[in-house]
Image (cartoon, grey):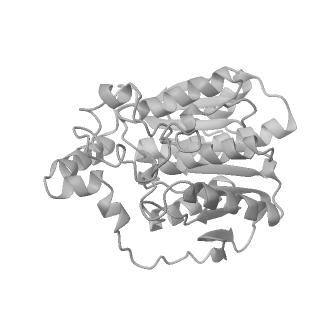
Amino acid sequence: MKTEEKTEKQDDKKSSIRAAIVRDTIARMTADRILGPKIQKGELRKNMVEPAWKCPECFTMEEISLEHCRAELLRLKEGRNTERAILQLHGGGYIGAMRNKYRSFAGLYNELGRGIDVLTPDYRVAPEDPYPAALEDALAAYEWLLAAGFAADRIVVAGDSAGGGLALALCLYLKDHGMALPEGLILMSPWTDLTAGGESYEANYTKDPLFGNTRDSMIYNLYYVGDDDPRNPYISPLFGEYEGFPPMLVQVGSIEMLLSDSTSLAQKAKEAGVKVRLSIYEEMFHVFQMAELMLPESKRAWEEARRFLHVLDRMRQENLSAQEEEDIYLHTEDGNGAEN
C-alpha cells in the first residue's frame, strides 16, 4: 500500500514562533560546554530526579508487577473505554528510565482514545541491563494486556525515540514467534538504526539542535547494544522484515539527525505492503511532541494521533480508500479540520 507522506507546515512554510524559541533554547543549552555534553550523552536524562507525580482526580494509577520491572496502568475512574488499550514504550536512549512526562503522555493517550487504558512499563535500561532486557520487558507488558482480556487487535503500541524503535522490535519479535500483532503503531521520531548509518546523520548534522555538531552523544553510544550486533533487527528494527505489520503512524521533525530512521522505515514498510502515514514536521526537532499542547506543531501531532486511532476504528468496520482515510485526517466527524 502507498505511504501517505505529509509535510506539516505553516502557510508561510516556517515553524511557529514558539517552536523557534524552543528550538533555539535547546541549541543554546547543548552548545554550553558544561551542560551540553550531559544533555547529548543522556546523563541528565538518566540521573533525573523528579518530584512525585500527582495523579489527576479523574484517573486511577495502578502499579503492575512484571517479571523484571514494574509498569503503571492509567485508567479513567468514570466512563472508562474498554474497547482498546495503549501500550506506551517510553524514550530515553535505552539508558533513561520512565519519567513524569510519560505519565502526562498516558493522560493524553487516554483522552485521544476517549477513555482507553494506558499501560507504561518502566523497562530495564542500559548500561546495567543492555539488550535484550528492554525487549523482554516490552513483551511482558504486551502479554500482561493480553492476559487482562485485551485482544491483540485492540492494542495499539506507541513509542517515542528509543520507545518507537522498541515498539517495532516488539512487533518483529511477535511476528517471528507466531504471536498476534497489535492493531496499530504510533511512532514519534523512532530510533530504528543504531548503526547511525542514515543519510540524515550527515545532512542534518549542523541543523539538529539536540544531537547536532558532535559524535559524542547517545545516538552514537552502544550501551544498549552491548556485545550484540547493532544490525540485529531486534536492536535496529530498520533491518527487519515488515510483511504483515499493522498500520503505522510515523511522525518526525525535518531537522533531526534521526530523520532517515523514519523515512527509511516508512519506505521499507511501504514496500512490504504496510499501510504507513509518514508526517514530516517542518523545522521540528527530536520528539517535539514533548511540548504536548503548548506548541502548534506538537498540538497538531497529537491531533493527528487521535485521528489515526479513528482511522483504525473505521478500518475495523469497512474498507477505506486512501481518499477516505485522508478525509478523516482533514475533516473529523465533529467538523474540526487539521491545521496544515
Residue at image point 38% right, 24% down: 199
Residue 249 in the image: state x and y as whole percent: 60, 37
Q: Quadrant of the N terminus?
A: top right
Question: Relative to residue 235, is residue 91 depicted above or below?
Answer: below
Q: Please tell me which residue lies in front, 241 or 25.
A: 241
Q: Is residue 218 left or right of residue 54?
A: left
Q: Is residue 277 left or right of residue 114?
A: left
Residue 137 in the image: state x and y as whole percent: 62, 61
Residue at image point 55% right, 66% down: 122
Residue furthest left as drawn: 33
Which quadrant of the view contains residue 328? top right
Residue at image point 81% right, 65% down: 147
Residue 196 in the image: state x and y as whole percent: 39, 35
Question: Relative to residue 63, is residue 303 depicted above or below?
Answer: above
Q: Is residue 331 something that shows in the picture?
A: no
Question: Relative to residue 281, is residue 217 depicted above or below?
Answer: below
Residue furthest front as drawn: 227
Q: Please tell me which residue lies in front, 179 or 57.
A: 179
Question: Relative to residue 57, is residue 211 depicted above or below?
Answer: above
Q: Is residue 154 left or right of residue 305?
A: right
Q: Is residue 145 something that shows in the picture?
A: yes
